[in-house]
Structure formats: C-alpha cells, structure tokens
Amino acid sequence: MSGSVVWVVSPKESIRCSLLNQFIEVKRRSWRRSSVAWSFSRPAPTSGHSVPASLVVTPPRTSEELVYEVVLRQAALVGETKRKRPATVQLPPVPLRGDLLYEAYERCGEVCAEYAKNFYLGTLLMTPERRRAIWAIDVWCRRTDELVDGPNASHMTPTALDRWQHRLEDLFNGRPYDMYDAALSDTVSKFPVDIQPFKAMVDGMRMDLWKSRYNNFDELYLYCYYVAGTVGLMSVPVMGIAPDSKASTESVYNAALALGIANQLTNILRDVGEDARRGRIYLPQDELAQAGLSDDDIFKGRVTDKWRSFMKGQIRRARMFFEEAEKGIYELNSASRWPVLASLLLYRQILDAIEANDYNNFTRRAYVGIAKKLASLPIAYARALRGPSRFTGATRT
C-alpha cells in the first residue's frame, strides 16, 4: 500500500478496501457519486498548525454504502454503452459461431431447466436473444457456486478460485474455455454487462473459504451482495428497462440488488440447521446476543421463545428487501417481468413455510409445494402485465 500511512486492517476491512479499489482501477474518471462518496479532506488549521491531507480520512463506510456505489457505476455503464455503441466500442470476437454457438446456449438452457424449472418457464416469454443470455449468466453463477458448495467443495483452494477468475477475465476478452463459457462470452459482447459483479461473486466464494461467522448485519450484507446481489446487477442489462419507465436507472438496479439480498437472506434462514451441521452460522452475532442466544443454542437446535422472537425479526427484514425489490420489477421490459416476479413470489413463500414450521429451521426444511408453485405462476403473470410506475427517484434499500 503506497503512502505515508500503513493501516493494519481486519479481513473485513481488507475486503471493503479491495472492493473500492476495483472501482477506482477499472475507471479513473468522475461518475455520479452518492452523498457518502469516499473522500480525503484537509481540515481547517488549528492553533496555527495544519494536518497533511494524506493523514486525514473519513471513517470506514458501511457495506451498504460501498455496494450502493457499485449500483451507481452499473447504472452509469448502461448510459455510456448506449452513447458509444456501435460506432466506437470494439468488442472481442467470440470463437464459436452458427450452430456451435446455438448449441452452447441450448446447453445452458438445459441446465437452467433442470435446476430452476419455474424460472426457466418464465424465460421462454423473453425474446430469444434475451432468454439465451439469461441462461448463460445463470449457468455461470451456478458453476461458480458449485466451487464451494458442490461435491468437490472440500478440495477448493484460493488458488483454484484465482484460476476461475482468470478464466472469467479470458471469456470477457473473447477467449472462452468451453461451450458454457462461449455462451457467456457472446452474451457480454452483446449486452452492457460489466465484469465487476462477476468478480465480486468470486470474492464471495473466497469469503466462504475462511469465514464462518458474521459479527453483524453489515458484514452479512456484504456477503449477500457478493453471492446473490451480484446476480441482479448481471441480469438487468439483459432483461432491459421498459421504454416508458420513468424510474431512474439506478433505482431499477438497486431493486435488482434488493432481490438478490432478499433471496440470500431467505436461503440463510431456511438452511440454519444444515449450515450449523457444517460448522457455519450465517446470522448476525450481535443480534443473536441481543436475543439472548449463542452459537451453542443453534448447534443444539432447540426452538425456544427466544429463537422464535429472533426469527420473526430476521424474516421481517427479508420481507422488507422483497418489498423493495418488487417495486423495481415493474420497471423492467414487459417480457422480462414474469420470470422475476415468479421467482420473487416463490422465494417469499419460503419465509411463510418457516413460520408454518413454527420456526424450526434446524430439523425441518421449509419448502414450497408443487401446488403452491403452480398457483404462483398465473399470479405472477397477472402482476407482470402491470405497467411501469411513474416513480422517478433513486431508492435505497
């Protein structure tokens, strides 16, 4: 680290600094900043002495503030791409063409259909180009998640994740390794999809290798952004924003981020028992302590009044993120709303199932039955017909 001041930071702060440095390195230019922009300032002299600006920094920002800056950058990228393409932006060629490229996309569709059936059905309403691109993104995300959560997770190392990131950079530069990579490589050449959310997801996988506790929701929020919020930022450029939407681009991106956070929080609440058996607790430690609970209570898996009260608060928070996410879905391109709404409705019902299980997420897995899933599809379709709102501001989750 250059400069006259050397900081000794925790792993959490290292992650934060790394995230910020990515933004600065990718684009050293001015972009729209929020009121919490990172700044170095020189205070007014006191007692005739001035303090060098390099020694004065603002306090570390929250994870939410850092991630919101990512949202602003992604939103700005869409506007820049619209202004530049096709005259000045030169994209690297993708090796596969014709039938081979079509087959690559079809394989991605097969994976999506197997592991996300309801979402896959919704993508069939999209234009062919959009649905194929969403399949390619979905498959890359699943393959990335499998690195630390799949059958070979016990053999995963930081070096292997570094190789996966190099492979990601290669496919963004038109050098895919396999057919799945080729489909994504073609996608990023056609849509204003930025590499940063993809890299951030790999950072989330790195975090899973060494971190099994989260001191507070600020830490957990950053993790949720890495492993799930990034998916929304990857997908919005493909799904598109409705031409008649009056919402700001960043507000739509922020809603997509909120959906990813809500989904991941739901996963965490559903899988408390399963994660505990692996020695992991993805719950804010300070909030557990405030509720009179400890790691031992979770490992023992007892449903008590304290646990019920704690879970009610966690579920309430997840639902707030779902509510924020739903606002932005209606601003998407009309053909893209249904699969996203269907996914939201189904995931939100997992929270209902946890409640129906009397908050026993230690030994009973909350799931949504086939009948409820099927009933959700026409409801989502009907809601998807609703047009964009007249909302014009940029919201914060």
Image (tube, helix red, strand yellow):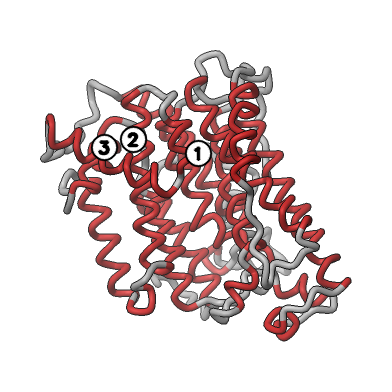
Residue at the location (77% across, 70% down)?
A: 287
- Disc number for residue 118: 1
Q: Position of residue 380 (x, y in %)?
A: 61, 29
Which of disc 3 and disc 1 is earlier in sequence?
3
Cα gap from disc 3 to disc 2, whole angstroms:
11 Å
- Disc number for residue 106: 3
Q: Position of residue 73 (x, y in %)?
A: 47, 41
Which type of secondary structure does the marked residue at label 1 adopt?
helix
Left/right of residue 119 with respect to residue 317 in the rendered view: left
Residue at the location (60% across, 38% down)?
A: 255
**Viewer-proximal residue, 60 or 295?**
295
**Viewer-proximal residue, 29 or 362?**
362
Which type of secondary structure does the marked residue at label 3 adopt?
helix
Q: Position of residue 91 (x, y in %)?
A: 20, 34
Q: Amino acid at mark 3?
A: Glu
Left/right of residue 248 with respect to residue 188 in the rendered view: right
